[in-house]
Amino acid sequence: MARHEGIPSLRKCLRPGWYIYWRKQIYRIRSLDSTGLILHVEDHLSKETTTLQVRHLMRADGEDQSIPLYAPTLEQLLREVENSQPQPEGAPENGLPPELVERADKMIDIVRFVEEEARELQCQEKNEQGKCSKACKIEKCKCRETDTLRLACSLLDEPIGLTTFYDYRGRCRENQWDRVQLAAAFRRSTYGKTRLNKAQLHFLDTIITDYYRADRPSSPMMVYKIARSALKFHLQNRWVDPDKCKKGVSQDLLAKLHLVLDERLPMQAVLENTADEELLSKITMPSRGFFYQYLNWFVSQPDQGREVMNKRYGKGTWERIYMVFDTFAHRATFPLQYVFADHYLLDVFIVDEATRSIISRLWLTVLIDAYSRCIVGMALLEEDPCIESIQSALLHAIWQKSSHTDLGIEGEWACYGIPQQLFLDNAWAHHSHSLENLARAIGQNGKFDTIDLVFRPPYKARYGGLIETYFEWLSDRIKQLLPGAIQSSDPKHVRDAAKKACLLYEDIYRFLQESVVEYNHTPHKALKMTPHEKWTEGMKMGFPIVPTLTDEMRRQFLHLIPETRQITEKGICVFGMQYTSPVVAKAERIGMDKKPIQYSLRYDPADISKIAMFREDHWLGDIGAKELLLPDGSYKPTSLWEVQTAKTLAKDANGDTGDWLAYVNKAEELKKMRMSEKRRRQRELQKGANDPTQSTAVVETVTKNGRGQQIDPTELLAGFLS
């Protein structure tokens, strides 16, 4: 980030893992020496390590390129660089350089001036019949056109020859006198195109997809050295030429060349086959700088990479060759470097515990590690995806797990730790002050890692490919094993699933715990081992360091209210209720600066009878709502939705929300009564299922009670709750 007002200080920017853009180079900070004066950094492209003097960064001034930019992530740094180097104001919309456009305007003006002057001169020299002389027998006389054009060219401020004029006029006519099109034509025909031939490009594509992968950890420099050495000493500077392959690149020949690269087949054996030898061409290795740029372009532009490779070598080529740049899986070099989060509406109906008749579906939130493909955390909620979904999954992911062992499930679920980068989709629910605060607070002022939140671009499903694969596996397992599973979106299948629904929340939760453990211990095709084994392999670099899971830390995962609150005489007002406790009574109200102290609050939407009170990320204690205090000193568990609904009903009935608490209490009583009536009526219907008179009586009773009566809003609420 550029050093200006509102941006973190230089001291905060010079931290391991941050990125620096300085003098047209991108570096990643590895460490800061004990004196705090020398930075050990790594070049982003070449992966070479070097050092930077902090004093040089602090004194940087003058040209824009010499002013360093800092950012915690590469994506954010690239945005900062783009913003700091805007397009010149005078540049046309199509991005052509101004000098080319000026040259085009000048050429058009010259041609028009010469033609107009020549026309006037020619008219003056012709006779009344339009002939150059009485002896001329040509119907459309142009005898003196050349002479007049030559004369007109000499009248220019900077005279030009007739040959130059003809060239100018031909260019203008070819481009329909369009200044932008003419300016673009000044560029060489190969502008924006690589100077490599197709054989060289195919060789680079093969080397990159084979060696720049997570299962073959290597830097761009190492891959370049491998390619240069293999081309010279193993391939004898030859590679398959797509231009010579009439039906596409021969996969058999490509397989042989791979064996040559792996030193399992001599190149001479390939050259001895005449048919194969005819498809090869001699190539040279491009410069290292070009190779780095080419590699970086593919990594940073996955969509264009797919389009280019499929266009070069045929449809499906990109998908067939590992899809190395289509996900972050092959770029991750250690566990928890990239963690992906996503939500999935389970394809199975469940029933409520009380009546076993109300059906619903559950939302699963999963966090998956790109390096090992392990599921590191999950959350199962009835609510649609929200901040609580992500924060609950993070709470489950960061610390060592006992959720499966508590259910008697055998098998090790070893993965845990703080993700370095958490990738989320661009849903509005994920852009939350609560989640951003948690990502920062988990680091406890530098003692532990913080979480870098990265939002996937809209309509870019490729970024979530890893987790989508797991969801497909889970969906197939659900459809095969669980009653009440929805086999397809066909209405008949949905009705059949609803009829067969019999599982409770607890059943689905146990099933998911078993499935995750099984998935983590099942061999993965891309890894050639199980995700658990890959995670264990990555742990050789060191185990994750996490803070102790205390009561205060648990409360950091509650939903943060964006606005802070002050303490008043009645306590702290939130959700239209007054919260108080001994903590509030002892808390300071006025700070050293003579201003009211601001407190932050966190809550659980499922129960807002008590909320957590914080001062500068330090938990002071829990405070309770006076309105929900019961005679025995406990608090009535009440959800945020219940309070909001009760206030709406109170306002509709009375014109204000003053009596909303009565609706909450009445709804609770009605809920218990209606549930009892519902069970009794179900028993009566089951007993009288074969008695038509009893069934008719029930219908008549319902019809009689429902005719001409005004509906009580509280009954609506109770009916919905039931």
Image (cartoon, helix red, strand yellow):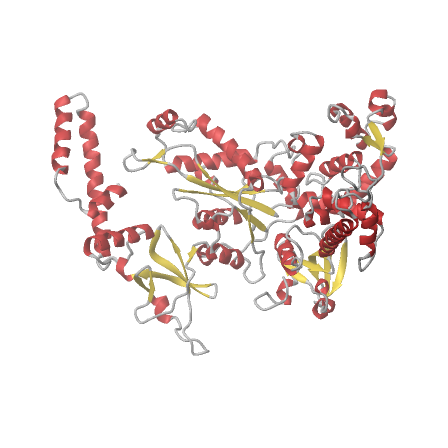
Q: Is residue 72 left or right of residue 701?
A: right
Pick the residue in front: 447 or 423.
423
Q: Is residue 241 left or right of residue 480?
A: right
Residue 718 coordinates in the image, percent (x, y): 23, 44
Viewer can see residue 191:
no
Residue at 74% across, 56% down: 99
Pick the residue in front: 17 or 407.
17
- Marks counted in the figure total 0
Residue 625 coordinates in the image, percent (x, y): 30, 60
Residue at 68% across, 29% down: 314
Pick the residue in front: 289 or 555.
289
Q: Is residue 486 above or below residue 649?
A: above
Viewer can see residue 615:
yes
Q: Is residue 444 above or below residue 359?
A: below
Residue at 85% across, 24% down: 277
Q: Is residue 25 left or right of residue 382?
A: right
Which image quarter is the C terminus in?
top left
Which image quarter is the N terminus in?
bottom right
Residue at 53% across, 42% down: 459
Quadrant of residue 511 within the rendered picture? top left
Quadrant of residue 3 within the rendered picture? bottom right
Residue 632 coordinates in the image, percent (x, y): 25, 57
Q: Is residue 42 above or below residue 682?
A: below
Residue 385 coordinates in the image, percent (x, y): 43, 45
Q: Is residue 546 left or right of residue 249?
A: left
